[in-house]
Image (spheres, rainbow, N blue to C red):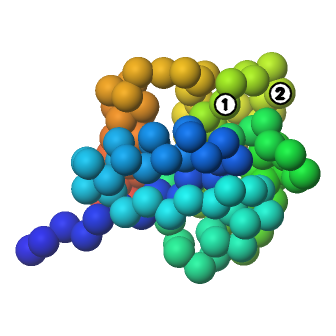
Amino acid sequence: MVALKKIILHVEDDTRVASAVSTILRERSYHVVTACSAEEGLRKVGKVKPDLVILDIAMPGMSGMTVLNKLRTQEGSTTVPILIYTAVPGMVDDGARATVDGMLVKPVENETLLAEICRILESRAQGAVSS
């Protein structure tokens, strides 16, 4: 049986960061979908049904915190794992931290990002098996 590629939705307004992360993840055989804004991320989450959302917090227009709140209440996305990937950790309160599966502060080493993604996906897979 061939394992399907995991789908990762990366919501990031900085095109350089989005491109770099996409390259790293594709090299590890993930299917990456990028959203350049919070609004686009919310539209895409229902369409692509990601295995993980990597979410920037500091974005123009709608903030990542608003996206996080909507993802945690929007039908079809309440259980999707979320990794906050931000340069502004002070914007993330304790309540929000309790609703996500991980948080990394930019910049991080590629291996650190990959290890956190693997940890979250493996944790979710084990939870699905034991349920």
From the top left corner, tell me how far across and down residue 129 is, in percent.
Answer: 31, 59
**Residue 73 shown left or right of residue 79 in the figure:** right
Residue 82 in view in this figure: no
Residue 47 drawn above or below residue 32: below
Q: Nearer the viewer, residue 118 or 107?
A: 107
Give the SS element for disc 1: strand
The reply to whether the C-beta atoms of the residues labelled 2 and 1 are less than 8 Å apart is: yes
Q: Which mark is residue 47?
A: none
Q: Residue at x 71, y 73 (%)?
A: 43
Q: Which mark is residue 91?
A: 2
Q: Residue at x 25, y 56 (%)?
A: 29
**Residue 129 shown left or right of residue 45 in the figure:** left
Q: Amino acid at mark 1?
A: Thr
Q: Nearer the viewer, residue 121 or 115?
A: 115
Quarter assignment of residue 74: bottom right
Q: Which mark is residue 86?
A: 1
